[in-house]
Image (spheres, helix red, strand yellow):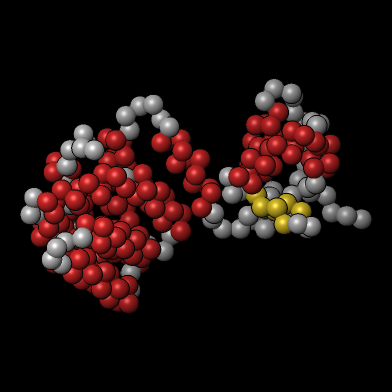
Amino acid sequence: MTEKGPQFEKINQTSVVQQVIDALTQAMIDKKLRPGDKIPTELELSESFGVGRLSIREAIKVLVYFGVLEIRRPEGTFVREGFSESMINPLLYGIILDRDDSYTYLKELRQLMEVGVIQMAIEKSTEEDHQLLTEKYRAFADALAADPVDVDAVFEADNEFHRVVSEMGRNPLVNKINSLVRVLTHAIRYRTVENMIAIGEGQTLLAAHNQICRVITTKDARNIEEIVGEGYFYNRVSLDQD
C-alpha cells in the first residue's frame, strides 16, 4: 500500500491557481511538505483540492518559477532544498516596479541590513575571516591609490569587501537578502564612489572601510550604527545626474 501524501481541503473556484499556491505554501510552512519531499502528482492534487488539473499545473509552474519547487524528470516535482536565486526575483521586481519613490526606504533598509550584518560578523567571524577581510580592505586601498583611479575597479573592490563581511555572518538567508539590497542600491552606490573620487575624497571613503574592518577584527560592537551611517556619504551625490 502506498503512503498517502498531505491531505488538502477542497477549494472553491475563485482565484483557483492562487489558492492552490497558497495551500501548497501553507503545507510547507506547517512542515507537511519539507525540503526534498516529492509533492503529489497533478492528478492526486486535482482530486485532493477538487479543481482541474490545468489549475494545478499553472500553480506548480508559478512555484517552480519562484524557485520553491523543482521538476526532476522523470521522478516528479519536489520541494527545493536550499536557496535559489530565483526566489528573490519576485521581490526584486516588485520593488523595481513600485510606483512610489522608494529611494529613502532603500537607504533605510540598507543601513538596517548593514548594521545587522556587521553585528553578526563580529559575533561569528574567525581569525581566518579577519585575514581575508584585511586582504579585501588592502585591495580596496590599492584600487584607490592607482593613478589614474579606475572607478569600476574601486567599485568592484568595494563590493568584494562588503560581500566578505556579509558571508562572515554565516546565515544564508541574511546573505541573500543583503545581496538583494546591494543589487537594488547598485546605482547610488556606484555614483557615490564615482563622486567621492572626483572630488578628491577617496581617503575619506577608505577611512570608512577601515572603521568597518576595525570593529569586526577587534570585535568591538560599539557605535556600529554611527559608523555605518557616516560611511554612506549620501550628501555627496546627486540623484539627478545622468
Q: Nearer the viewer, residue 225 or 222?
A: 225
Q: Position of residue 32 (x, y in %)?
A: 69, 48
Q: Nearer the viewer, residue 97 or 19?
A: 97
Residue at 25% across / 49% down in the picture?
A: 190
Residue at 41% across / 64% down in the picture?
A: 170
Residue at 17% across / 42% down in the picture?
A: 237
Q: Quadrant of the N terminus?
A: bottom right
Q: Position of residue 101 (x, y in %)?
A: 32, 29
Count of number-bearing discs:
0
Looking at the image, the residue that sits furthest to the left is 200
Q: Is residue 71 above or below residue 123?
A: above
Q: Is residue 68 above or below residue 118?
A: above
222 sits left or right of 159 in the view: left
Q: Position of residue 164 (x, y in %)?
A: 33, 65
Q: Quadrant of residue 175?
A: bottom left
Residue at 36% across / 44% down in the picture?
A: 184
